[in-house]
């Protein structure tokens, strides 16, 4: 797989990036070197290798969902530094 200037320009447009000609050419060269290295993997004989999703044998331990008695809104709201209309009020972080 080879990357060209048009591919870089398309990706830059999608990412709303303004790139100089030198930057575009640098990305073309760097990505083509990377893809050349990845092409080596296509040459490996993997016929005797079992497909895996990940390399570790870690498994998610799930628990059964249980409906239990909750604390109740009134008790929870006692810990609220500020409250508005029965909800926690927090400082605005997005304008």
Image (cartoon, helix red, strand yellow):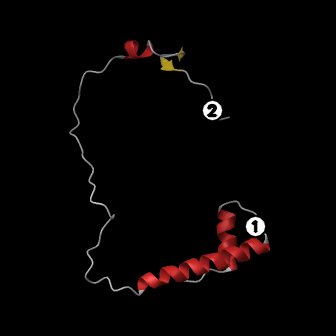
Q: Would you identify the image quadrant in which residue 36 lies?
A: bottom right
Q: How many marks?
A: 2
Check the image and report above or below for 84 versus 42: above
Badge 1 is on which residue?
19
Return the x and y of residue 62 as percentages of the image width and height: 24, 44
Q: Position of residue 19 (x, y in %)?
A: 75, 67
Could you tell me residue 39's position as x and y percent? 48, 83
- The CA distance from mark 2 to mark 1 is 31 Å
Q: Residue at x 66, y 81 (%)?
A: 4
Secondary structure at badge 2 equals loop
**Residue at 43% across, 81% down:** 41
Q: In which quarter of the image is the N terminus?
A: bottom right
| Foreground residue among 75 and 32 | 32
Q: Name the residue under label 2.
A: 93
Q: Residue 43 carries which label?
A: none
Locate residue 91 relative to residue 41 in the image: left or right: right
Work out whether residue 31 or residue 65 is closer to the camera in this orientation and state it: 31
Examine the rendered structure and indicate whether residue 22 appears above or below residue 39.
Answer: above
Quarter holding residue 10: bottom right
Q: In this view, does 74 lie to the left or right of 51?
A: right
**Disc 2 + disc 1, Cβ < 8 Å:** no
Q: Which residue is drawn at 44% across and 12% down?
A: 78
Q: Report crowding for label 2: few under 14, some 14 to 19, many 20 or more residues within 10 A (C-alpha).
A: few
Which mark is first along the chain, 1 or 2? Answer: 1
Left or right placement of residue 75 versus residue 26 in this view:
left
Q: At 30% from the left edge and 21% from the top edge, which residue is drawn?
A: 70
Q: Say what secondary structure mark 1 lies in.
A: loop
Which quadrant of the rendered structure holds the C terminus? Answer: top right
């Amino acid at each position: 797989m080879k990357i060209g200037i048009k591919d870089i320009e398309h990706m830059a447009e999608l990412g709303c990036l303004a790139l100089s000609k030198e930057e575009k050419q640098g990305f073309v060269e760097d990505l083509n070197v990377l893809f050349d290295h990845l092409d080596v993997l296509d040459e490996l004989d993997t016929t005797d290798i079992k497909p895996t999703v990940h390399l570790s044998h870690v498994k998610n331990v799930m628990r059964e969902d249980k409906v239990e008695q909750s604390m109740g809104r009134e008790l929870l709201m006692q810990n609220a530094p500020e409250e508005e209309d029965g909800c926690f009020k927090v400082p605005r972080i997005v304008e």
